[in-house]
Amino acid sequence: MTLQEKLADNKKKGKALLATNFYNFETLSAVLTAAKNTDSELILQLSESSIKYLGLKVAKSLAESAIQQYGVTAWLHLDHGQDVTLVKKCIDAGFDSVMIDASEKPFDENVKITKEIVAYANSYGVNVEAELGYISKLGQDQKMIYTQPEDAK
């Protein structure tokens, strides 16, 4: 089942799907053990920094091998990808989903970049998540600027 199919199925059933980051084998093992023990499916997320640390090929291979070893259903997602080149590399590498985070750019530029990634991902059947408006991340100024409903439309 693809991630898109799973999300659509969960939406019909009023269910959620946990998405959690992993940074190394230990964190990956921990979340997969928990998923196996609770008979849960999940989205395994990698950040840009984790990919830089592990390397894209190693990170993807590690996730795939561990998913198989633990016998858990899981999908691989790039979390908060700000580097368009890396986002495309993750799509090319076979990630099930990516997040393009151009939220720190002006709104029109954010939309343009997001559309570019959506078009690129479409032929792969890869799910794309994007962030509109500014939502502070760990270590950043905690500005309270919310996404405006008219922008979300």
Image: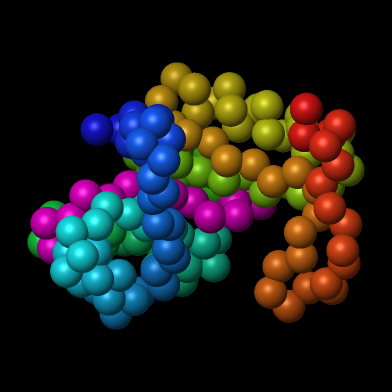
Judge whether 143 appears above or below 93 on screen. below
Q: Is residue 73 visible?
A: yes
In the image shown, does 14 or 41 lie closer to the viewer?
A: 14
x, y percentage for residue 73?
21, 49
Residue 39 x, y percent position in the rendering:
18, 59
In magenta, the rendered stretch is 70-83
Rendered image quadrant of residue 11: top left
Q: Quadrant of the N terminus?
A: top left
Q: Nearer the viewer, residue 107 or 19?
A: 19
Split into 4 quadrants, where in the image is the C terminus? top right
Query: Which of the colour schemes (rainbow, by chain, secondary structure, one colour) is used?
Result: rainbow
Residue sitting at x 24%, y 71%: 34
Residue 68: which quarter of the image? Answer: bottom left
Task: Write the residue at 54% across / 60% down.
Answer: 48
Q: Position of residue 59 (x, y in %)?
A: 35, 61
Residue 80 in magenta stretch = yes
From the viewer's perspective, tell me whether residue 113 is left or right of residue 87: right
Question: Which residue is painted at 73% across and 78% down in the image?
Answer: 139
Q: Is residue 117 left or right of residue 36?
A: right
In the rendered structure, the answer to whether residue 10 lies left or right of residue 99 reads left
* Residue drawn at (68%, 27%) of the image: 115
Residue 52 visible to an observer of this rendering = no
| Residue 15 colored in magenta in the image | no
Query: On screen, 142 above or below 120?
Result: below
Please provide percent x and percent y for residue 55. 41, 62
